[in-house]
Amino acid sequence: MLEFKKPEISDKPWVDKCLKHAASMSCEYTFGNTYIWAEAYNSEICKYKDFFICRWGSGNKKSYSLPLGEGDFSDAIEQIIKDAKENGCTPVIYGVTAGYLSMLQEAFTGKFTYKYNDGFNDYIYKTEKMATLSGKKYHSKRNHITNFKKNNPDWSFEEINSDNVAECIALHMKWLNDKDDEENEDYAEEFSAVLTAFENYDKLGFKGGLIRIGGEVVAYTMGEELKGANCFVSHFEKAPSEIQGAYAIINQEFSKNCLLGYEYVNREEDLGLEGLRKAKLSYHPEIILEKCIAVYND
């Protein structure tokens, strides 16, 4: 029987231990991501033997993560199917990458239907390339950064810490206020997750950086390590659109100053948004990680 509960900071050590065995660089496979979005997605977590399992939603609209950890994978999937049925739900498993897809197909032949949506693919880059932006294909990015530095000679970079968190929150609020009312409503859940992240920044093991112009914070980014994958996941990145090169320089400076210890950086999905997709593709991802939804049909 699966016993689910709301995630707490005290759960991080055992969840991290399970996630080290995840055979993927999926952005969902981090404790911080689960914790900061728990309120928005009504997330609950469960420790089943040596597996971590997450469940989202309410009523008969629940869905599940893969069981991540060590042990009998098929048994853990059976427990997910049982829990879903007990809640009157069709068993649905999100974030199924290629390795787990093969495991599901082998253990549950014909019992799941697999659905893909390009909007949920992860964009994964070589950190060194993000830090150097060398080569012809990054020429436009280097130009943006050169113009930024030329127009803002008093710019500076620093890591996020308890002394400057409030300034990052203020920047995010300004970014929100520049949106229209409809968009503000759409981004409310993201801002709630950002606040949760900053309130628990050190406890979650988050890492971030910011850019200043004349002492004022104009861009920030933050994320966390993806355990066992030599990869960092960037969860949030914000800057005013009117400051040319702000996004390009925070990306490069953070990669150069904070992320060279990781081989890869996962910059998450584009959610089907054409502008976001174009921006992510412009950095020439090393890997576009496909993820599907497995729907039980037995």
Image (cartoon, rainbow, N blue to C red):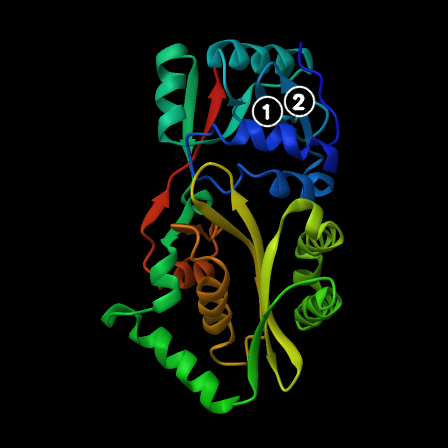
Q: Amino acid at mark 1?
A: Phe
Q: Position of residue 58 (x, y in %)?
A: 72, 28
Judging by the rendered image, the residue that carries numbered circle 1 is 52
Quadrant of the frame with the N terminus:
top right
Please report the residue visible at 42 percent of the width from the left and 34 percent of the height from the top.
Answer: 24
Say whether residue 14 is left or right of residue 241.
right
Q: Nearer the viewer, residue 209 or 86?
A: 209
Say whether residue 218 is left or right of residue 142.
right
Helix, strand or loop under label 2: strand
Verify CB contact (< 8 Å) between mark 2 and mark 1.
Answer: yes
Q: Is residue 286 depicted above or below 6 in this figure?
A: below
Q: Position of residue 269 (x, y in %)?
A: 47, 49
Q: Nearer the viewer, residue 229 or 65?
A: 229
Helix, strand or loop under label 1: strand
Q: Reading the chain from its start, which is encountered first: label 2 or label 1?
A: 2
> Residue 87 occupies which quadrant of the picture?
top right
Q: Nearer the viewer, residue 12 or 281?
A: 12
Please report the residue visible at 67 percent of the width from the left and 81 percent of the height from the top.
Answer: 216
Viewer can see residue 109: no
Say whether residue 122 is left or right of residue 203.
left
Judging by the rendered image, the residue that carries numbered circle 2 is 46
